[in-house]
Image: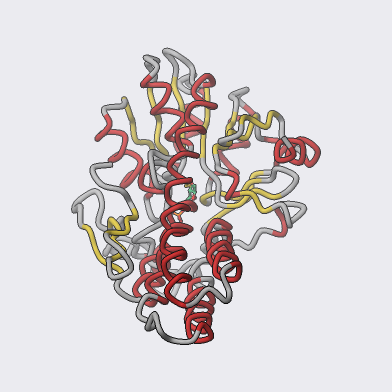
């Protein structure tokens, strides 16, 4: 990325800046989120999107919400603002657990400093938001190192949606695996699913990979089966928005279908995600809340109506790939091969 997807410039009086991803690839524009509501809107409208980036933006949105409390004010005032901001941001999008993980971390940080005064807690919250960002960047690098060996030298890799630099603090999760393999000198072709209805694959993944000089080819989502049948793909790697304790993984709508196709064609299917994407409090994928988005994103997504006025639409934004279809989950700690409840547990006990 020329600049980070989500950035905080300066101290408490600084600003939260994001790349407006809804404008890509036609326009590269940085915007400032100068209120909690503006941050909420940016997350809801997918100006900032991708599970880790949503978490970072939410943590920084909390800072936006508490920074105007006078440093001399009683702590109660700060905590009221903190909870108001966190509760509101938590309603922006339901599926990516990184959002709730980051908000919980910010609240826990403040709680741990009760009694130290408003100014100290404000400073610590800004530091915590920046730490969440820095840790995410380090996790991307580690995921890349842990997954690069699975990339077929001289082969093809298919990915769905965007799990790259635009979705994280550094160069992604699924795409980190590809960037690292390329850095190691492997040569391979990437097939990027367009990812209906909001085209994160076409608009973001293809843009990002072209910027980086990787060999990327765009396909429509419904071409994946044919591309696999033609023997063009030897690995699938995708990101995740929430992974349950048994390894079931929610990701952008369409991922489940890709996993079934990969199984049918004997192609390994990998999920790459940091530990902040695991929700060990839930047993299986059925419990993962799936966001539903507006009809218009399907019927007139990019300004032109493509379905009859008044038609009924159902638009789940995510689906869950059962663990049985996943060859391995690549995290910053290593790889969970053939994930199941026991292996996920063992991975986090290490
Ligand atoms: O609706 P989006 O664009 O936020 O969905 C993003 C995805 O599904 C990504 O694959 C996922 O968040 C992983 S990003 C490292």
Q: Where 204 falls versus 224 (above or below)?
A: below
Spot the residue most to the front: 116
Identify the residue shown where x is 42% and y is 76%.
66
Identify the residue shown where x is 57% and y is 63%.
100
The answer to whether residue 142 is seen in the rendering is yes
Identify the residue shown where x is 60% and y is 71%.
111
Near-viewer residue (39 or 139): 139
Q: Where 259 falls versus 250 (above or below)?
A: above
In which quarter of the view is residue 345 placed? top right
Q: For the C terminus, which image quadrant?
A: top right
- Count of labels shown? 0
Judged left or right of residue 176, residue 338 is right
Near-viewer residue (265 or 70): 70
Whole-percent x and y of residue 53? 43, 53
In which quarter of the view is residue 155 placed? top left
The answer to whether residue 298 is seen in the rendering is no
Near-viewer residue (320 or 170): 170
Identify the residue shown where x is 43% and y is 59%.
127
Whole-percent x and y of residue 154? 42, 13
Judged left or right of residue 30, residue 111 is right
Q: For the N terminus, which image quadrant?
A: top left
Q: Where 308 falls versus 203 (above or below)?
A: below
Judged left or right of residue 253, residue 28 is left
Near-viewer residue (34 or 266): 34
Whole-percent x and y of residue 119? 42, 74
Whole-percent x and y of residue 248? 69, 45
């Amino acid at each position: 990325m020329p600049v980070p997807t989500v950035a905080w410039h300066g101290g408490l009086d600084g600003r939260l800046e994001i790349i407006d991803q809804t404008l890509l690839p036609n326009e590269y524009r940085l915007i400032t989120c100068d209120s909690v509501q503006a941050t909420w809107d940016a997350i809801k409208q997918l100006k900032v999107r991708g599970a880790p980036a949503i978490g970072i933006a939410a943590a920084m949105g909390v800072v936006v919400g508490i920074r105007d409390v006078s440093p001399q004010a009683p702590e109660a005032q700060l905590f009221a603002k903190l909870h108001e901001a966190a509760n509101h941001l938590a309603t922006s999008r339901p599926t990516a657990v990184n959002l709730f993980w980051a908000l919980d971390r910010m609240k826990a940080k403040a709680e741990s400093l009760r009694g130290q005064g408003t100014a100290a807690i404000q400073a610590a919250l800004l530091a915590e938001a920046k730490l969440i960002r820095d840790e995410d960047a380090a996790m991307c690098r580690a995921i890349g190192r842990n997954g690069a060996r699975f990339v077929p030298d001289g082969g093809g890799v298919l990915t769905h949606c965007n799990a790259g630099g635009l979705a994280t603090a550094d160069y992604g999760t699924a795409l980190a695996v590809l960037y690292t393999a390329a850095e190691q000198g492997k040569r391979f072709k990437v097939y990027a699913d367009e990812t209906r209805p909001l085209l994160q694959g076409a608009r973001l993944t293809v843009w990002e990979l072209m910027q980086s000089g990787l060999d990327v080819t765009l396909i429509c989502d419904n071409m994946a089966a044919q591309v696999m049948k033609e023997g063009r793909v030897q690995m699938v790697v995708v990101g995740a928005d929430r992974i349950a304790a048994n390894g079931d993984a929610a990701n952008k709508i369409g991922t489940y279908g890709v996993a079934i196709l990969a199984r049918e064609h004997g192609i390994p299917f990998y999920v790459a995600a940091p530990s902040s994407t695991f929700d060990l409090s839930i047993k299986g994928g059925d419990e993962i809340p799936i966001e539903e988005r507006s009809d218009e994103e399907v019927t007139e997504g990019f300004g032109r109506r493509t379905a009859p006025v008044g038609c009924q639409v159902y638009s789940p934004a995510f689906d869950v790939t059962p663990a049985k279809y996943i060859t391995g989950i690549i995290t910053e700690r290593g790889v969970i091969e053939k994930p199941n409840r026991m292996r996920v547990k063992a991975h986090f006990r290490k």
